[in-house]
Amino acid sequence: MLYWEYYVMGIILLPGLLLAIYAQSKVSSTYSKYSKMMSQKGMKAWEMARLLLDCADLQNVQVIKVSGNLTDYYDHKKQVVALSSTVYDSSSVAALGVAAHEVGHALQFKNNYLPVKIRSAIIPITNISSTILWPLVMLGLIFNFAAMPGSLVGDICLWSGVIIFGLAVLLDLVTLPVEYNASNRAVQVLSKTEILTEEETKGAKKVLGAAALTYVASLLTSILNLLRFLLVFLMHSRRE
């Protein structure tokens, strides 16, 4: 591959990289700001999550603490809302917003929200395909650097890469509405239950909005990676 081709590919990935850096910076600054704002009612994140789950008749879903910072997640198979150690015992607006977001995922499954079911079905396929196909992609790169165009093995490896990056785009594409919807559900439930004041709810919304931007950056990066790999494939075909 010529040096200018590497230069073009670097330029292609630049927008995704810049957006990812901005999104991470936005999340850090926004979360830091509202993690210092304590809610007037003083309810801890785990207490609020438990209350919201009980109100939604989801007593079977547990609320647990996990190590790390912003490592929060919802596991539908295990029926668990996992809150990070920095969120679990906190009464900050940021922590309550994050906890409500994870409860939002539990509500999605209860209400049979279609995108979250599609995402759950895609994740195992993506994991399996990545495990199987990544070695072929690496082999394809070796063939590419070895300047062996026209090889059937090289073509198979390159197509494997296209499939991997294509699935990544599909997963991120489905993840985007899932995350935004969970955040919207969180804001709605916080407003209805009046756990937070109107001003505090606005703060939680800003935290969730900043976090959602990271998923936009992830989707853009996945699309650009797919485009980059397609260019590799086209350049490989052109040399044949």
Image: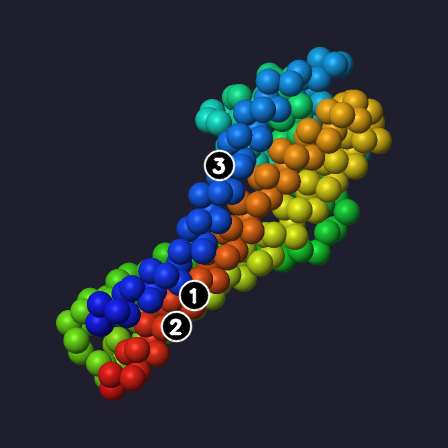
Give the quarter of the figure containing the C terminus: bottom left
- Tell me whether circle 2 and circle 1 mark residues in contact (CB < 8 Å): yes
Q: Residues within 10 Å of mark 2 (few under 14, many from 20)?
A: some
Using the image, tell me which numbered label, if any, was put on residue 25: 3
The image quarter containing residue 137 is bottom left
In the rendered image, residue 57, in percent from the top left (x then y), is placed at: 79, 33
- In the image, 44 versus 60, the foreground residue is 44
Identity of the residue drawn at 76% across and 14% down: 41
Cα–Cα span, label 2 and label 3: 30 Å
Secondary structure of the residue carrying tag 3 is helix
Cα–Cα span, label 2 and label 1: 6 Å
- Tell me whether circle 1 and circle 3 mark residues in contact (CB < 8 Å): no
Cα–Cα span, label 1 and label 3: 25 Å
Chain-order first, disc 1 or disc 3: 3
Using the image, tell me which numbered label, if any, was put on residue 230: 2
Identity of the residue drawn at 48% across and 49% down: 19
Secondary structure of the residue carrying tag 2 is helix
Identity of the residue drawn at 77% across and 47% down: 111
- Amino acid carrying label 1: it is Leu
Q: Is residue 70 left or right of residue 47?
A: left
Q: Which residue is mark 1?
A: 226
Q: Is residue 127 above or below residue 166?
A: above
Q: Residues within 10 Å of mark 3 (few under 14, many from 20)?
A: some
- Amino acid carrying label 2: it is Leu
Q: Is residue 108 left or right of residue 98?
A: right
Secondary structure of the residue carrying tag 1 is helix
